[in-house]
């Protein structure tokens, strides 16, 4: 291989840069916690089970969005037989009132910025609703 | 072949560097627009399309004009255009890049642009516009690149390129027809609601595009030993002459229909453009400049003695280009909104950030053009040696 | 080693393009699944301008609509957002305007809003189907999630019914209605015939707010409805009928 010293040094530097997020988190300990979610509500049960919601909450919200806006169907029949209004603001946020204590905890940890729900959808605590104003798209 | 664009004279690198600076300024302005919203432009609730869409409309025409070189050479064996076709094809590539970028900077929620692909809507003309522009871009890029590569290797181009070339001819007509359909199918906008919109677009495209191509050819001749030939330039000049005469004729036809019938819904837009309406006359000086330039260009181009003098030809081509840029860009697009469907007048003037973003996109287009032309020039220079 | 690299790349490219293309085509020509109601409604409004003129300077319907839907109040007229507003006769009905229009008609502006046309040009031109006509009730709806903000619908609308969010709306809303979302900048919006209120069997906000009961709301497909009765016993006009948009807002002048 020509310039083998330069090439191999380059590869090592590249690998280091590519794995740098791991080293950074290890060194600063910023990621060494499990996000703690607070729910300020008297309800004991969500629309669906915790395991289901953990895996599918975004898909559920997207389905609700299409069914309400495009299909006009606003009532959700949950697997436990109860009926709920398909609404992020009126149903979900009724129990998970503090976005910063619930949604943001995991989304910030995982760095999942999109979709920018809070640019438009209201939160029960309207003071934090101004924080939802995220510039750009 | 792209390595040819990575080495050049001081003048070449000055050009590239200046373009990058312009692009940088435009990009910064675009970040500002992303943050604050499209309200930083001069557009309004009544004039919802402005400078960006005007540039898009104009540049689709420039892109389509490559057919004016390809058709005579490949369909009718007009050998004089042999060295010119690659310049036309690469001009088309860079124009389509700019068209796409002008649409992108005009979009309110650009992160959702892929929705147009995820939810295709064949009833919307935009859908067909994206298909035809995307296809045209690929066609010209592939045809140009493969032809040039074969030339560099001194071998005939592969046989599969021929059907693509033949396809690009009606495709070029289609891209500008579809762009005209964006406007001509809207009953709401009486200024655009005319069947002659597509022919007007094509005529102005075939005047402005080849005019620009002639100017670029002169520049290429100055900075290299590559010369597409006097006959090629003169034939192109004749094409520009006929096209601009037909374009002016089409506009006169429009004026007749509007003013002979006296239907206010149609006349009021022309009145605003040429004379001002209810005291609002922002576009009037621009339109009269456009007319004077067009008439001057026609006089200079029709007379073979003035057309054959290269200095005068250059001036005439600049006049054609600027005249059509004004008439098709601001004149056509903005006037469709003035007066509004409710017969109110909201005027439009682009703002500084809007102009900066526009210049940035033009910078990107010229950068693409410079890189592609540099490759052509290097290969032709080498051949000459 | 039966296949060479070039052929493999060609096949892979073709396969991926056709895969995406088929998905796109089925989406384009397949129909979106919507709720099927027993009978399709055709919702419409009749605006009785005789009653509207009773109270000069009244803006109850506008205030109600804009409050319920978090429509921002933007001072710059170029950026204004409005779902329902007042226009003088010459602007609302330009093709019917003339020099000797009656004082009665000139005295008070007409209420204008989206006409929820049967043949809406805005729906035809939308490249993402972010605006669409609901089959179940005929409302021309906006899907704010899907809108890319190209403003083609605004260009196509003959009634100027649509507004674009040229800047962030939130700073311009005095009191946010928490049960209805605000819109982010970069999307187009317009009257949605209070689809969210109709779903709860409430009347549209403008209909409910009008003290004179000048706006009548109903289903044109129901031959026994009040709106059908009013249409058959009164002279009504619509805006720009020659464009064949088939608007569903009728005016009694």
Image (cartoon, coloured by chain):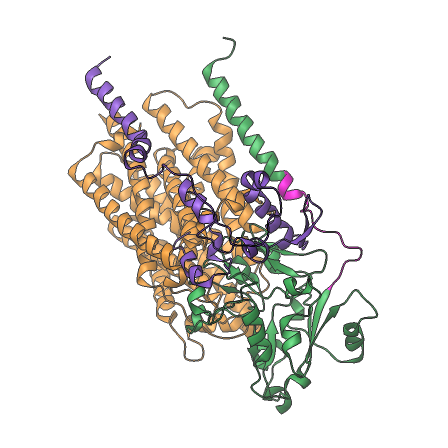
Q: Left or right of B211: which side holds C35? A: right
Query: Residue at point 36% right, 63% down?
Result: B350
Q: Is residue C39 magenta?
A: yes
Residue B33 colored in magenta in the image? no
Residue B310 coordinates in the image, percent (x, y)? 26, 48
Residue B326: percent from the left, percent from the top?
38, 60
Extreme-right residue of the structure: C224
Residue that sits furthest to the top in the current view:
C1
Tell which chain the image draws in green.
C
Apparent colour of chain B: orange
Is residue B305 in sight in this rendering?
no
Residue C36 appears left or right of C109: right
Q: Which residues are magenta?
A: C26-42
* Residue A59 location, quadrant: top right
**A29 lies above or below B343:** above
Magenta span: helix, strand or loop, mainly? loop
Q: Position of residue B79 (x, y in %)?
A: 39, 33
* Residue positioned 27% across, 43% down in the render: B218
Name the image quarter holding the C terminus of chain C: bottom right
Residue C2 appears in the figure = yes
Q: Quadrant of residue C244?
A: bottom right
x and y percent of residue A99 in the render? 47, 53
A112 or B143: nearer the eye? A112
**C135, B201: nearer the viewer:** C135
Query: Does B190 appear above or below B201?
Result: below
Taking the spot 44% from the left edge, 39% from the top edge, the residue there is B137
Chain letter, purple in picture = A
Tally of numbered discs: 0
Horizontally, is B198 left or right of C192 in the view? left
């Amino acid at each position: 291989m020509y310039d083998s010293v330069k090439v191999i040094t380059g590869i090592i530097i590249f690998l280091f840069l590519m794995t740098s997020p791991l080293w950074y988190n290890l060194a600063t300990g910023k990621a060494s916690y499990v996000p703690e979610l607070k729910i300020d509500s008297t309800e004991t049960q969500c629309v669906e089970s915790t395991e289901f919601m953990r895996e599918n909450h975004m898909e559920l919200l997207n389905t609700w969005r299409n069914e309400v806006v495009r299909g006009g169907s606003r009532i959700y029949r949950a697997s436990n037989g109860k009926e709920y209004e398909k609404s992020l603001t009126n149903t979900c946020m009724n129990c998970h009132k503090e976005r910063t204590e619930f949604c943001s905890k995991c989304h910030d940890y995982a760095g999942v910025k999109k979709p920018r729900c809070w640019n438009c959808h209201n939160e029960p605590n309207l003071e934090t609703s101004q924080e939802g104003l995220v510039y750009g798209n | 072949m792209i390595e040819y664009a990575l080495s050049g004279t001081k003048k070449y690198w000055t050009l590239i560097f200046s373009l990058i600076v312009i692009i940088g300024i435009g990009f910064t302005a675009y970040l500002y627009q992303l943050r604050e919203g499209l309200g930083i432009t001069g557009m309004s609730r009544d004039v919802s399309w402005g400078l960006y869409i005007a540039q898009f409309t104009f540049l689709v025409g420039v892109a389509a004009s490559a057919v004016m070189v390809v058709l005579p050479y490949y369909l009718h064996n007009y050998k004089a255009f042999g060295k010119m076709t690659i310049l036309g094809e690469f001009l088309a590539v860079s124009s389509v890049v700019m068209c796409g970028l002008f649409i992108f900077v005009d979009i309110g929620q650009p992160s959702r642009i892929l929705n147009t692909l995820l939810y295709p809507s064949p009833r919307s003309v935009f859908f067909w516009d994206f298909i035809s522009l995307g296809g045209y871009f690929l066609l010209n890029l592939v045809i140009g690149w493969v032809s040039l590569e074969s030339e560099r290797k001194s071998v005939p181009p592969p046989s599969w390129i021929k059907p693509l070339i033949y396809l690009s001819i009606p495709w070029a007509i289609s891209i500008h027809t579809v762009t005209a359909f964006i406007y001509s199918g809207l009953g709401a906008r009486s200024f655009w609601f005319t069947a002659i919109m597509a022919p007007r677009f094509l005529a102005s495209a075939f005047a402005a595009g080849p005019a620009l191509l002639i100017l670029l050819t002169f520049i290429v001749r100055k900075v290299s030993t590559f010369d597409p030939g006097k006959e090629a330039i003169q034939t192109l000049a004749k094409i520009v002459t006929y096209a601009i005469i037909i374009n002016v004729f089409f506009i006169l036809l429009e004026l007749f229909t509007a003013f002979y019938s006296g239907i206010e819904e149609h006349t009021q837009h022309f009145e605003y453009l040429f004379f001002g309406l209810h005291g609002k006359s922002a576009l009037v000086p621009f339109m009269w400049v456009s007319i004077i330039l067009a008439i001057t260009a026609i006089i200079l181009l029709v007379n073979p003695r003035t057309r054959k003098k290269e200095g005068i030809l250059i001036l005439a081509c600049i006049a054609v280009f600027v005249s059509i840029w004004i008439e098709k860009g601001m004149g056509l697009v903005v006037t469709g909104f003035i007066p509004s469907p409710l017969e109110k007048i909201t005027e439009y003037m682009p703002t500084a950030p809007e102009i900066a973003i526009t210049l940035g996109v033009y910078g990107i287009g010229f950068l693409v053009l410079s890189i592609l032309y540099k490759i052509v020039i290097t290969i032709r220079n080498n051949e000459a040696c | 080693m039966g296949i060479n690299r070039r052929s493999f790349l060609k096949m892979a490219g073709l396969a991926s393009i056709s895969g995406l293309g088929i998905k796109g085509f089925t989406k384009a020509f397949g129909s979106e699944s919507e709720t099927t109601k027993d009978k399709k409604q055709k919702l419409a409004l009749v605006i009785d301008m005789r009653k509207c003129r009773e109270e000069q300077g009244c803006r109850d319907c506008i205030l109600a609509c804009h409050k319920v839907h978090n429509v921002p109040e933007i001072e710059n007229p170029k950026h204004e957002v409005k779902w329902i507003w007042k226009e003088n006769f010459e602007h609302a009905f330009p093709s019917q305007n003339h020099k000797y229009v009656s004082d009665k008609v000139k005295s008070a502006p007409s209420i204008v809003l989206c006409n929820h046309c049967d043949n809406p040009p805005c729906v035809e031109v939308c490249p993402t189907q972010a605006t669409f006509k609901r089959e179940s009730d005929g409302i021309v709806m906006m899907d704010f999630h899907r809108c890319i903000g190209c403003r083609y619908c605004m260009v196509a609308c003959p009634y100027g019914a649509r507004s674009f969010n040229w800047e962030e709306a939130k700073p311009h809303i005095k009191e946010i209605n928490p049960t209805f979302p605000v819109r982010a900048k970069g999307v187009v919006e317009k009257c949605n015939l209070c689809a969210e209120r109709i779903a709860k069997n409430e009347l549209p906000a403008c209909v409910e707010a009008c003290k004179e009961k000048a706006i009548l709301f109903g289903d044109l497909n129901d031959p026994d409805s009040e709106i059908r009765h009013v249409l058959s016993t009164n002279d009504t006009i619509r805006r720009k009928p020659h464009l064949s948009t088939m608007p569903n807002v009728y005016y009694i002048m």
